[in-house]
Image: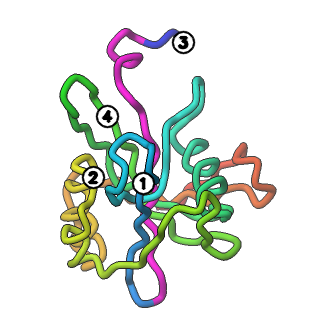
């Protein structure tokens, strides 16, 4: 299906929220020389042409963090405008992954208590996700949030998707 001109003008990004056993959330710092260098963000990245948000999330977390995504829960679709650039974030909570989280692109990583995320210079596009994340971690049922959990194929190809409610 051809993309509309609005879709072409929008930067589409898959975002993963990972939490450790201490309920800290992983953030990554943008590297020098990149757009918005030095800002902190949730791991993820741009969707490639024809790529679904979930496939992009799997690919980006493999490339950035060296992990294979096993289980995710869709959190939200958020939009933000940076001047003339519109960004659409597809946000997933990563419930389980294979491998150890590493800075595969030599980017600074930090595990942060969710209540302190805003103190870290988080990208403006990621900021609306923080409040929703805090509600989610507290077990608050936020209207409009998807509660489907996706179990991804163990082969890592991302082709098979099973869902549980």
- Residue at the disc numbered 4: 87
Task: Using the numbered discs, state the Cα–Cα distance from disc 1 to disc 3 in whole angstroms.
Answer: 33 Å
Q: Nearer the viewer, residue 61 or 51?
A: 61
Q: Position of residue 148 (x, y in %)?
A: 45, 57
71 displayed left or right of 115 = right
- Residue at the disc numbered 3: 1
Which is nearer the N-term, disc 2 or disc 4? Answer: 4
Which is nearer the N-term, disc 1 or disc 4? Answer: 1
Q: Give the crowd class for mark 2: few <14, some 14-19, many >=20 residues within 10 Å.
A: some
- Residue at the disc numbered 1: 30
Q: Position of residue 116 (x, y in %)?
A: 22, 77
* Residue 102 falls in image quadrant: bottom right
Give the foreground label among 4 and 3: 4
Residue 89 against residue 22 in the figure, above or below = above
- Residue at the disc numbered 2: 123
Residue at image point 46% right, 53% down = 31
Magenta part of the chain = 4-21
Which is nearer the N-term, disc 2 or disc 1? Answer: 1
Which is nearer the N-term, disc 2 or disc 3? Answer: 3
């Amino acid at each position: 299906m051809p993309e509309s001109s609005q879709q072409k003008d929008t930067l589409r990004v898959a975002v993963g929220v990972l939490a450790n056993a201490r309920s800290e959330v992983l953030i990554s710092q943008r590297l020098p020389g990149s757009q918005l260098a030095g800002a902190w963000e949730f791991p993820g990245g741009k969707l490639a042409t024809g790529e679904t948000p979930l496939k992009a999330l799997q690919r980006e977390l493999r490339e950035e963090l060296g992990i294979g995504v096993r289980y995710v829960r869709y959190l939200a679709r958020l939009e933000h405008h940076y001047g003339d650039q519109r960004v659409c974030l597809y946000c997933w909570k990563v419930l389980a992954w294979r491998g150890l989280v590493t800075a595969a692109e030599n980017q600074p990583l930090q595990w942060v208590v969710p209540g302190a995320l805003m103190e870290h210079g988080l990208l403006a596009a990621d900021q609306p996700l923080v409040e929703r994340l805090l509600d989610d971690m507290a077990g608050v049922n936020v209207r409009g949030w998807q509660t489907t959990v996706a179990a991804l194929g163990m082969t890592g190809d991302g082709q098979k998707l099973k869902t549980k409610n």
